[in-house]
Image (cartoon, rainbow, N blue to C red):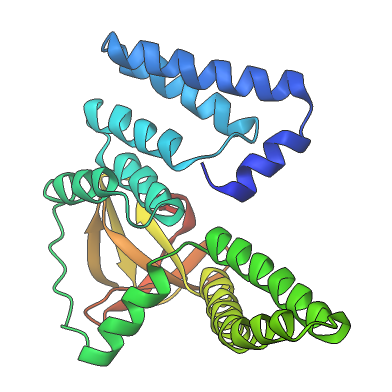
Amino acid sequence: MTVLIYILLLLAPKAEVDQAIYLFQQGNEFYKQARYEKAIEQYEDALKMGYESAELYYNLGNAYFKSKEIGRAILNYERARKLAPRDQDVLYNLQIVQLYVVDKIVTPPPFFLAKIWRQVKTYFNSNQLGIFSLVLYFLTVILLIVRMLAQKEPILKIARYFLVPILIVFILTTGLFLIRINDDHQNKEAIVLVDKVDVLSSPADDATEVFALHEGAKVSVYEKSGSYLRIGLPDGKVGWLKQDAIEII
């Protein structure tokens, strides 16, 4: 569970928190009994109450996978990855379930520096970066106060020694945090949840079909027009499809 979500749970009414945790635990029990539909029901109810964590999304993804709902399994693994981008269990299960996706979309290899930058951006989630920035901010303020008020030379030396490195890390972390927030807001991705959906040349029922996508395919969402969304694939294909065929990660 991320620190931010944990804080929100602490601020929520205790009865609601207890009920959400109870639903999550009940879901785990149903999963152990191979009663996957009941497990899904409990996990989804916990989410509706505001309880959110990488573990919950991961377990929900597992339950959907066991129920052979590939699209929803991928959707929840992707949501778990957003909260825990370095979790090896999440990454492994996501790779496994993607083998069941019909559409094998070829992604052009990224430029070397672009690949490194993407790895740096996604190493921490936005909540973690926000917490780091806040902690570094307070450390910077404390060191500045110590430097201004301290009378003894050893304390001043310590403040000078740590102030500049912490300030640099604070600026870098805050910059990365703002970039992640902007990416999360601007670059929306979604998963196809229906068996097959026709992607059209324009947002109209009588438009020409340009290609088709199947359950589990991951798309980028660019804009909305009525009940249609304009989407794109990593290989450069773009088109319009009905918004109820996909769900935002």
**Residue 176 image point, x, y percent:** 52, 79
Q: Nearer the viewer, residue 184 or 179?
A: 179
Write the residue at 74% across / 18% down.
Answer: 15
Give the quadrant of residue 136: bottom right
Q: Is residue 109 left or right of residue 90?
A: left
The answer, for residue 219, to whether it is visible in the render is yes
Q: Nearer the viewer, residue 68 or 94?
A: 94
Q: Is residue 162 left or right of residue 103?
A: right
Q: Quadrant of the C terminus?
A: bottom left
Above/below status of 159 relative to 197: below
Above/below status of 143 relative to 9: below
**Residue 92 image point, x, y percent:** 19, 47
Q: Is residue 13 left or right of residue 93?
A: right
Q: Nearer the viewer, residue 184 or 112?
A: 112
**Residue 152 image point, x, y percent:** 79, 82
Write the residue at 77% across / 73% down.
Answer: 142
Write the residue at 72% across / 79% down.
Answer: 155
Write the residue at 63% across / 50% down.
Answer: 4
